[in-house]
Image (tube, rainbow, N blue to C red):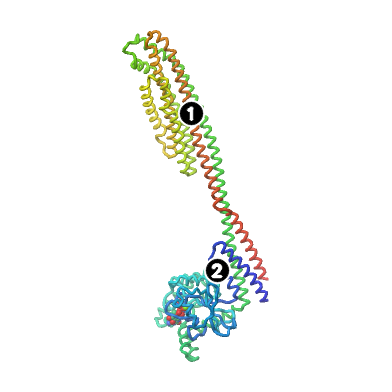
């Protein structure tokens, strides 16, 4: 039966190696250590009784006393911080050693046998400060009547010293402790660290704890009130942690230890044993060992505990991994949904943009055509106006020659044409403005939705560049020069008024269209459109230069009679109107194309930019976690395998 059990134990041990490796592979070094502890405990088939407690609570004194020693060779006692490494006390019944001796087990696995006298050179802070000798543990083999072939005592360094590694050592030993003798001293109230340690015992679901109040002899020297206060403090704090607590042993180990050391007679020793509280504690520990240290029972209990522990561990790991997987998929899905939504929005916006541009184009063309018709219709009234003027003046007098005559005729013609030119200009402004507002609204909504300043700044950069380029191409100076070619002689006057007109109209336009533009994106698009409109205005300007043509005509006909001049006027007016119409229509058509292209580019750039960005996010996410999903899947599979093995082992062990 036991053999059978042993076989199962080996299977479980092999399995535990796998689980320790799983924890290590997943970077859970503390869990791996804990699991290794369970594994070692299962392997050793020992019943570990650990003596634990804050520094200087009398742990070593109690060990020496319980193990019947007359000196402190096996667990040195000191008034300063003393014990620095873990020591195990193994009765010779277990290993059949002839002589009492100790083994130093080094961290690198080496083992050195020494005499009991030398133990202090390895286990105390005085002789092995901060464990410079790299001792893993010391195993002491001796005559320890309280122990049997299963039960082992373990002395631990005191917690709460200046040496943090003491606490770590104690904590890492916890999983292996089957029973704990926890000590606190009666000469002071419980410290915070001691209460914390009790909570840790509760957390780790430690059972089989002997709660011991040491140095009771010192307490007995105080008033009854103080005695009561100390006991209440200790009992109250233990109870508060929720640990299953039945009894507080009140002992004076030092009394018995000193009596033995001084070689007192048996009678005295026995009386002291009882009086010091050691007899009662010893009896309970002895019973506990008898009841619990049967190897088969230890094994059965340990396998059960270990399996339970492994099951909890694997289940927790599994739900964690499943959670990570679900989150991973959810993130990916959210991104994909976002991208799809964006695609739809993009398509809608693209359609809207096309509709708006079509509408813009239609209205623009119609306005220009209407203007051209108006110019045609104005040819006769202009000729009449000039005729009347010349009739009124009678004859071209010497004083009216030159600039003065041209200026007068020019002003008359200008007043006839200016309305149409300004109306066209205004109409085009409105059409462009409407387009601007529509698109700008969409762009703003889009940018706000995307929450992306990069796009906005990109649009700003691109928009201004595009429109600035247009302005150079179609802008005031170039256009004035083109017209200037037709009206060379008018040169100085023409360019001055053209510039003045352009500046005035564009400033007004600017305020009208963009005075209230608030967002950066709006302002950017606004800037761009403003530049474009400047160009528009400049394109309409030649209308005002028509008188220049008349002046040219006058110059040519300077030598002819009043009559012959008059006869030529309709032809000159028609010709100039034709030239102006052509210039204006061509330039405005060019300009219209430019506006359309620029808007198209801006919106397209915005849309593709955002799509690209989303695509980049999706790709980067996949790139950043190469095979993340796969590794999570693998982890899940591995855990599934471990879980199945645990269930198989559980039913196998139960059989
Ligand atoms: N009065 C009195 N003093 C005791 C008793 N037990 C231990 N002491 C004294 O307390 C001091 C510390 O005892 P140790 O046994 O070295 O305590 P420890 O808990 O092992 O100390 P560390 O290993 O350093 O944590 C020593 O001076 C002991 O003599 C006791 O029952 N009564
Ligand atoms: Mg000690």
Quadrant location, the N terminus: bottom right
Q: Which mark is residue 34?
A: 2
Task: Give the foreground label among 1 and 2.
Answer: 1
Q: Which residue is mark 1?
A: 592
Quarter of the picture for ligand 1? bottom left
Relative height, residue 424 to residue 244 (above, below): above
Relative height, residue 484 to residue 137 (above, below): above
Instruction: Please rate how many residues cluster around mark 2, counting C-alpha atoms within 10 Å: few if below 14, some from 14 to 19, many from 20.
Output: some
Q: Nearer the viewer, residue 504 or 594?
A: 594
Q: Position of residue 395 (x, y in %)?
A: 35, 9
Relative height, residue 371 to residue 181 (above, below): above
Q: Position of residue 400 (x, y in %)?
A: 33, 13
Q: Nearer the viewer, residue 216 or 444?
A: 444
Q: Quick check: can you spot residue 78?
A: yes
**Residue at 51% of width from left, 31% of height from top?**
357
Q: Which mark is residue 386?
A: none
- Judge left or right: residue 245 versus residue 499: right
* Alpha carbon distance from label 1 to label 2: 78 Å
- Judge left or right: residue 326 versus residue 587: right
């Amino acid at each position: 039966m036991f053999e059978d059990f042993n076989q199962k134990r080996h299977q479980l041990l092999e399995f535990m190696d796998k689980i320790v490796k799983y924890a290590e592979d997943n970077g859970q070094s503390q869990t791996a250590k804990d699991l290794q502890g369970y594994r070692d405990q299962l392997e050793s088939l020992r019943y570990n009784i650990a003596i634990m407690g804050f520094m200087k609570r009398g742990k070593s004194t109690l060990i020496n006393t319980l193990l019947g020693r007359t000196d402190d060779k096996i667990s040195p006692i000191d008034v300063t911080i003393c014990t620095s490494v873990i020591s195990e006390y193994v009765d010779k019944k277990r290993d059949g050693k002839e002589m009492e001796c100790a083994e130093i087990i080094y961290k690198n696995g080496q083992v050195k046998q020494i005499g009991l006298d030398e133990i202090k050179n390895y286990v105390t802070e005085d002789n092995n400060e901060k464990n410079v000798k790299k001792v893993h543990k010391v195993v002491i083999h001796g005559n320890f009547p309280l122990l049997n072939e299963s039960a082992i005592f373990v002395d631990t360094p005191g917690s709460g010293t200046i040496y943090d590694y003491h606490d770590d050592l104690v904590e890492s030993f916890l999983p292996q402790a089957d029973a704990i003798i926890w000590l606190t001293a009666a000469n002071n109230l419980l410290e915070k660290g001691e209460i914390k340690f009790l909570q840790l015992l509760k957390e780790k679901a430690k059972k089989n704890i002997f709660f011991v109040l040491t140095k009771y002899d010192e307490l007995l020297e105080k008033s009854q009130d103080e005695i009561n206060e100390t006991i209440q403090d200790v009992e109250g704090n233990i109870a508060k942690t929720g640990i299953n607590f039945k009894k507080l042993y009140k002992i004076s180990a030092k009394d018995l230890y000193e009596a033995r050391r001084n070689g007192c007679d048996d009678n005295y020793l026995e009386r002291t044993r009882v009086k010091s509280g050691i007899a009662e504690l010893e009896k309970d520990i002895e019973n506990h060992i008898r009841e619990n240290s049967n190897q088969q029972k230890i094994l059965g209990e340990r396998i059960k505990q270990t399996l339970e522990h492994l099951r909890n561990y694997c289940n927790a790991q599994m739900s964690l991994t499943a959670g990570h997987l679900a989150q991973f998929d959810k993130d990916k899905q959210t991104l994909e949904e976002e991208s799809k939504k964006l695609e739809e929005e993009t398509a809608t916006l693209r359609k809207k943009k096309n509709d708006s541009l079509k509408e813009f184009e239609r209205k623009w063309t119609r306005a220009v055509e209407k203007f051209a018709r108006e110019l045609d219709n104005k040819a006769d009234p202009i000729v009449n106006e000039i005729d009347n003027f010349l009739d009124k003046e009678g004859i071209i007098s010497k004083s009216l020659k030159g600039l003065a005559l041209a200026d007068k005729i020019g002003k008359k013609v200008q007043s006839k044409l200016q309305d149409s030119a300004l109306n066209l200009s205004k109409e085009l402004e409105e059409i462009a403005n409407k387009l601007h507002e529509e698109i700008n609204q969409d762009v703003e909504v889009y940018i706000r939705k995307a929450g992306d300043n990069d796009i906005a700044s990109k649009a700003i950069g691109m928009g201004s560049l595009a429109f600035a380029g247009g302005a150079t191409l179609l802008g005031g100076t170039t256009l004035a020069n083109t017209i200037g070619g037709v009206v060379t002689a008018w040169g100085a006057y023409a360019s001055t008024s053209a510039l003045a007109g352009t500046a005035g109209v564009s400033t007004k336009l600017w305020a009208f269209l963009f005075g209230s533009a608030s967002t950066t994106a709006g302002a950017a698009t606004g800037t761009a459109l403003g530049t474009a409109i400047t160009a528009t205005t400049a394109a309409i300007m030649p209308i005002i230069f028509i008188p220049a043509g008349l002046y040219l005509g006058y110059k040519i006909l300077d030598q002819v009679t009043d009559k012959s001049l008059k006869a030529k006027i309709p032809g000159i007016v028609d010709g100039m109107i034709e030239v102006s119409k052509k210039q204006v229509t061509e330039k405005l058509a060019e300009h219209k194309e430019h506006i359309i292209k620029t808007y198209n580019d801006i919106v397209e750039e915005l849309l593709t930019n955002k799509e690209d960005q989303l695509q980049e996010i999706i790709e980067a996410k996949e790139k950043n976690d190469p095979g993340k999903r796969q590794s999570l899947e693998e982890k899940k599979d591995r855990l599934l395998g471990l879980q199945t093995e645990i269930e198989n082992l559980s039913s196998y062990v139960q059989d």
